[in-house]
Image (cartoon, rainbow, N blue to C red):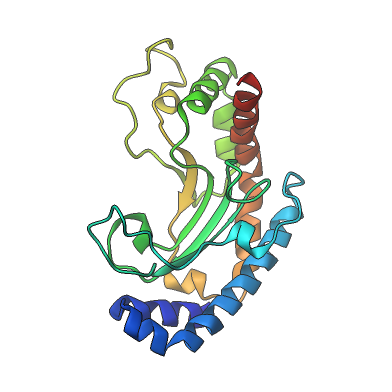
Amino acid sequence: MERVLHFLRDLNLNNNREWFNAHKSEYLEAKRFFDTFALGLCEGIRGFDDSIGPLGINDITYRIYRDVRFSHDKSPYKCHMGVFVSPEGRRAGYCGYYFQVSAADRGGWESSHIVAAGDYMTEPGVLKIIREDIELGGGDFRAVCNLADSRFSLDRDNCLKNVPKGFPADSPEAEFLRLKHFSLSYCPDDEFVTSPDLQDRLVSMFRTTAPFVEYINRAIRYSREER
């Protein structure tokens, strides 16, 4: 992964079309390496999650070109590369397993290496079902969270100040009912993402989150059946 990170760092310092076109061969080399890695990671995940069917590279990776139509930042290229493995591919709307290597300096999630599992920006209909499952589940959501590798933490960004209407304010699951994102994440350092056994490390970490991912995907499937 060092060659990918090296290219992304150069791109971060020269985020313009002239530089990118002059270094297109370096981009293609980094992309080939990352694509091969992504496909291998996908196969590793399929080894423990049978909801993941055969997926092609376009089903699990993203274009490097930024959509700048509604952004104040007009930099044309992303300075990160990511792979998202989920049932039926990244466009299908299910939650899954995400890995990102980054050299961006914009702040926020784009500027971090990320290992994550779950669902970000959970849809309202799914959110309601998850909350009902949590409240009625007798602690099963807490249990699946506790199964995850200890380096993961729940995404508590923008969580509600109070338990949402329709749920008891004194619920023992109140901390989870207030969540707006149902994602486990870990931001590793450069040493982690450049380690020679990175793929094995990620598969091992993601394996511990499989019950969590299935918990969220169960709610997504149910919400679709209700439509």
Judged left or right of residue 158, residue 113 is: right
Judged left or right of residue 45, residue 33 is: left
The residue that appears at 57% across and 15% down in the rendered structure is: 136
Residue 99 lies, with reference to residue 153, above or below; the image says: below
Q: Percent position (x, y) of residue 162? A: 31, 20
Q: Quadrant of residue 29?
A: bottom right
Judged left or right of residue 53, residue 129 is: left
Q: Which of 102/48 is in front?
A: 102
Residue 186 lies, with reference to residue 136, above or below; the image says: below
The residue that appears at 45% across and 27% down in the rendered structure is: 176
Q: Quadrant of residue 54?
A: bottom right
The residue that appears at 39% across and 12% down in the rendered structure is: 170
Q: Percent position (x, y) of residue 70? A: 29, 52
How many numbered discs?
0
Q: Residue furthest left?
A: 72
Q: Percent position (x, y) of residue 153? A: 45, 45
Q: Quadrant of residue 75?
A: bottom left
